[in-house]
Image (cartoon, helix red, strand yellow):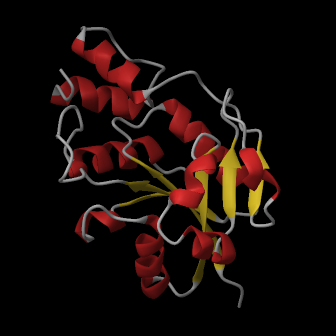
């Protein structure tokens, strides 16, 4: 039986917005991936907490954003891992826990040039497919032709979680910037105010 192809889309999702959801949905509907997991990164204990909302609040928002969208799932796998968590370690945990799945990575083109500096990047490139969505102004660099890397021209939004947090703080609504269920929860909870 073939393994379920599962793409991992890591992020702080602080908060999750429609730009994230467009990329996740693009990857699950226009590639060979069976599922895309939005992996919520925990607060790094060595960094100042600053404007990062609590781990479980961000996870809850991602679950609201996904709703019942087929093929998308929220993951908190890194919440119980040693901090900071490295991608290679997260993949090892997931492979042990889900032997029926074949995992790959999803990342923005702005991250690709830094990949050689990641922990065990040689193993990542040897053992995992990497789906890269283009980021304007960020050339893919020398790894663009690597056999494990596929470049995707996914639709992108000039939208950031920082812009959304600033808008909320300033008292502006965020309708259409985040999924409706997320907008509702942000309004009710007062998160980021």
- Residue drawn at point x = 40 percent, y = 29 percent: 161
Kindly tell me whether residue 74 is visible in this rendering: yes
Where on the picture, by quarter, is residue 146? Answer: bottom right
Left/right of residue 100 with respect to residue 73 in the rendered view:
right
x 47%, y 72%: residue = 88
Question: In the drawing, does residue 139 fall left or right of residue 78?
Answer: right
Q: Where 13 falls versus 55 (above or below)?
A: above
Residue at the image point whose x is 17% and y is 25% from the top: 190
Left or right: 166 with respect to 31? left
Q: In the rendered view, would you say 86 is above or below 23? A: below
Point out residue 43 in the picture as x, y percentages from the top left corner: 24, 50
Residue 67 percent across, percent down from the top left: 44, 47
Q: Say which quadrant the C terminus sits in.
A: top left
How many discs appear?
Answer: 0
Answer with the quarter of the image where residue 82 lies: bottom left
Residue 13, percent from left and from top: 38, 41
Q: Residue 87, located in which quarter of the rendered image? A: bottom left
Residue 70 visible? The answer is no
Q: Quadrant of the N terminus?
A: bottom right
Q: Position of residue 22 (x, y in %)?
A: 60, 37
Q: Work out whether residue 185 or residue 153 is closer to the camera in this orientation and state it.
A: 153
Is residue 190 found left or right of 68 in the rendered image? left
Residue sitting at x 48%, y 20%: 176
Using the image, determine if residue 160 lies above or below residue 127. above
Decide: is 101 above or below 48. Answer: below
């Amino acid at each position: 039986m073939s393994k379920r192809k599962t793409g991992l889309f890591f992020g702080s999702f602080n908060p999750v917005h429609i730009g994230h959801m467009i990329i996740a949905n693009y990857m699950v509907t226009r590639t060979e991936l069976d599922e895309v997991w939005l992996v919520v990164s925990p607060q790094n204990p060595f960094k100042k907490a600053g404007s990062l909302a609590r781990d479980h609040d961000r996870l809850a928002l991602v679950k609201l954003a996904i709703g019942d969208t087929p093929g998308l799932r929220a993951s908190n796998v890194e919440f119980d891992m040693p901090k900071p968590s490295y991608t290679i370690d997260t993949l090892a945990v997931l492979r042990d826990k889900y032997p029926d799945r074949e995992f790959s990575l999803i990342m923005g083109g702005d991250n690709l040039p830094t990949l050689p500096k990641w922990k065990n990047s040689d193993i990542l490139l040897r053992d995992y497919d990497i789906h890269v969505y283009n980021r304007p102004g960020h050339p893919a660099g020398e790894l663009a032709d690597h056999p494990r890397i596929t470049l995707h021209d996914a639709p992108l939004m000039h939208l950031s979680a920082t812009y959304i947090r600033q808008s909320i703080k300033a008292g502006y609504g965020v309708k259409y910037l985040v999924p409706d269920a997320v907008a509702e929860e942000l309004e009710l909870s007062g998160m980021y105010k």
